[in-house]
Image (spheres, rainbow, N blue to C red):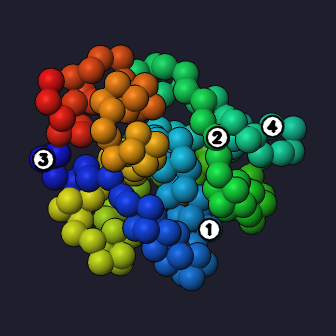
Amino acid sequence: MADRRTLPLSPSQVKLIRAQLAEAGDLRAMAMFSIAVDAELGAGDVVSLDVSDVWEKGKLLKRPMLLLGKTQKRVSFRMCAYTREALGKWIKQEEKTEHDPLFTSGRTDRQLAVGTFRRMVDEWVTAAGLDPRDYGAHSLRRTRASMVTGKVANVKAAKTVLGHGKRKPTVRDFGGED
């Protein structure tokens, strides 16, 4: 079994959380949740995004290229329509420029703290009726990889999708056998 707080979300759980965030009208949360799932980003990478990472010359990029903080690897990902819509509305609502942090604290224009993002994820999963002891910020990173690799039947594919350099972290993350 995978470590607690890292279970990937199912497609129906993703839809439920997106619906709840949309109903609440929280554009920031909708954009953060969606890009974390689409780009398979960890908490530190989500909060360190700048507008220029997803926006260029007045338009959202369809396939942004990001530099991951932990591994220093460049990864490209396709943003789904929902994510592009949420990000576009968020950037316009907040009148952000390409030089601004993408996600800021509600009280300041400073980059959102990792701990704040993790607490938000706990609130989202709890509101969806899920146990926050099983799902956390790392769950968002693992969700798309799990969907893409067919519930992780193929550890090699999951390794590639997640950008892991070695097999061991992927096996550990998905509870497979080494």
Give the mark toward the camera: 4 or 2. Answer: 2
- Mark 1 or mark 4: name the one nearer the start of the chain: 1
Please name the amino acid that badge 1 sits on.
Leu
Do tag 4 and tag 2 residues touch (Cβ < 8 Å)?
no
The first of marks 2 and 3 along the sequence is: 3
Residue located beneath label 3 in the image: 1
Question: Viewer-nearest of labels 3 and 1?
Answer: 3
Q: Secondary structure at mark 4?
A: strand
Count of number-bearing discs: 4
Q: Which corner quadrant holds the C terminus?
A: top left
Dot 4: few (<14), some (14–19), or many (≥20) neighbours within 10 Å? few
Q: What residue appears at the point 55 percent right and 27 percent down from the top-left corner?
A: 75
Q: Name the amino acid type tagged 4.
A: Glu
Q: Which of these two is toward me, 87 or 49?
A: 87
Q: How would you rate the neighbour count of disc 3 (Cα within 10 Å): few for under 14, some for 14-19, many for 20 or more? A: few
Q: Which mark is residue 56?
A: 4
Kind of element beneath mark 3: loop
What is the crowding at mark 1: few (fewer than 14 residues within 10 Å), some, or many (at least 20)? many
Q: Which residue is labeled 2 in the image?
A: 78
Q: Nearer the viewer, mark 4 or mark 3?
A: 3
Q: Which mark is residue 27?
A: 1
Going by the picture, which residue comes out furthest to the right? 57
Q: Give the residue at x 54% y 81%.
A: 24
